[in-house]
Image (spheres, helix red, strand yellow):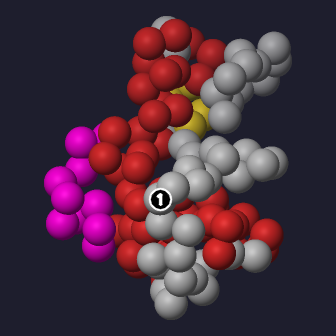
Amino acid sequence: GCLDRPTGGSYLLAGEEVATLSRVRLAEVRNRTLGFVFQSFNLLARTSALENVELPLMYAGVPRKERHRRATAALERVGLGERVHHHPNQLSGGQQRRAAIARA
């Protein structure tokens, strides 16, 4: 996740040597290239699965229509196409995990 610096060898991510990146560039790489799935999923309780998946895209400045299209497609890829409007408390633990994967 580019949270630690390598202590040996080389670590290339998208063609860039991670050990030589500045803290600012590492943050950019994390924000633009990597996704994280947390053990507790960290889904927002008052928002639908679709809105949870759209959230990082919103922070990345993706336009609303494109954000909606990409989030819907991600949920469909993890088998939640028919649960896009369900809130986390309406999803099983496995479905919450898949929503978190779609968000990542």
- Residue at 35% across / 50% down in the picture? 57
- Residue at 44% across / 12% down in the picture? 24
**Span of residues in magenta:** 60-69
Residue 87 in the image, given as x and y percentages of width and height: 56, 68
Residue 38 in the image, given as x and y percentages of width and height: 73, 46
Q: Is residue 61 magenta?
A: yes
Q: Give the quadrant of residue 45.
A: bottom right
- For the C terminus, the quadrant is bottom right
Which residue occupies the foreground of this view, 81 or 21?
Answer: 81
Q: Amino acid at mark 1?
A: Thr
Q: Badge 1: few (under 14), some or many (20 or more) residues near its Cα, within 10 Å?
A: some
- For the N terminus, the quadrant is top right
- Residue at 24% across / 50% down in the picture? 62
Q: Residue furthest bottom?
A: 82
Q: Is residue 85 above or below residue 79?
A: above
Q: Please, what secondary structure does the residue beneath circle 1 have?
A: loop
Which residue in the structure is indicated by mark 1?
A: 47
Please identify the dominant SS of the magenta region.
helix
Q: Is residue 26 left or right of residue 12?
A: left
- The answer to whether residue 77 is seen in the rendering is no
Q: Is residue 48 left or right of residue 101?
A: left
Q: Is residue 74 left or right of residue 88?
A: left
Which residue occupies the foreground of this view, 51 or 20?
Answer: 51
Q: Is residue 8 above or below residue 71?
A: above
Q: Is residue 40 magenta?
A: no
Q: Is residue 22 above or below residue 103?
A: above
